Amino acid sequence: MSTHEPERSVDEAKAPRTEYPLLGVSGLQAVYDRIIVGLRGVSLEVEAGQVVALLGANGAGKSTTLKAIAGLLPAENGAIAGGKIHYQGRDVTDEPARVLVRRGLIQVLEGRHCFPHLTVEENLLSGTLSRRATRVRRDRDLQRIYDHFPRLAKLRKQRCGFASGGEQQMVAIGRALMASPRLVLLDEPSMGLAPQVVEEIFRIVRALNRDEGVSFLLAEQNAHMALQHADRAYVLENGRVALAGSAAELRARSDIQSFYLGGSPAPVAAASVPSPL
């Protein structure tokens, strides 16, 4: 297998339509320390050009799902114990993270993980380390990031450690975009942020999806916000997919409204579990 994928700029990230989904996960099982079960047969799909939300409470398996897809479980003494992951029609279940990054599958980890002693612009440029970018292309992509995140343009020479939480989240997303992704796995983008900042982040994500053609699979506890901006959503409970459907369908469901948007908890209908891919 080649160690380098063809160079893509940010505006070339949209994948062509194919007979298979951009991402297909079937019966995914995951464990930590060989005994702690994290996932119990998760199945989901992301079509090219979609924003798909992965909803659920703390401990439901959202972050584990994203890390399994991105090849990051071994870094936390975790492993895939069953199931398959297909990306762009290819089985990538056992592919290491570095190979997936080169193929355009990028994760933005929960908690931003910016480099505090580097400037905002240096953090963004670190996203190009996985690709062989010319200076002209790198500068062009950097300007595209600033066009989407004008606040970052004003902070480009400031150390990232002095930026607010919302600004650091923008840096983390912008850094991922500098790697020319086809699919971004975005973990809890609203965590610890003020409501107006969360709204801004989600508007930017939707604009990037619309204008750049980047697909997103985002794990989020804020179901109300996620369902406003996603095309489809999956609800996880105890490491399983308990419910799936279009964002509009899930917004209209009383059990989603009561369990995730306030009110008395209601059990999620087991009959709505999707069949394996």
Image (cartoon, rainbow, N blue to C red):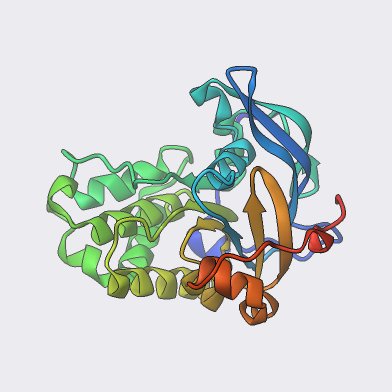
Q: Is residue 206 above or below residue 2?
A: below
Q: Quadrant of residue 268?
A: bottom right
The image shows residue 34 at horizontal and vertical percentages of: 64, 17
Residue plotted at (65% across, 59% down): 235
Q: Is residue 79 above or below residue 100?
A: above
The image shows residue 108 at horizontal and vertical percentages of: 45, 48
Specify the farthest residue to the front: 264
The image shows residue 51 at horizontal and vertical percentages of: 60, 67
Q: Is residue 155 above or below residue 229?
A: above
Q: Tell which of 121 and 30 is nearer to you.
A: 30
Is residue 46 visible from the viewing direction of this image?
no
The image shows residue 249 at horizontal and vertical percentages of: 70, 78
Q: Is residue 264 left or right of residue 69?
A: left
Q: Tell which of 174 and 1 is nearer to you.
A: 174
Q: Is residue 108 left or right of residue 166?
A: right
Q: Is residue 96 above or below residue 268?
A: above
Residue plotted at (47% across, 40% down): 132
Is residue 270 visible from the viewing direction of this image?
yes
Q: Tell which of 189 and 107 is nearer to you.
A: 189
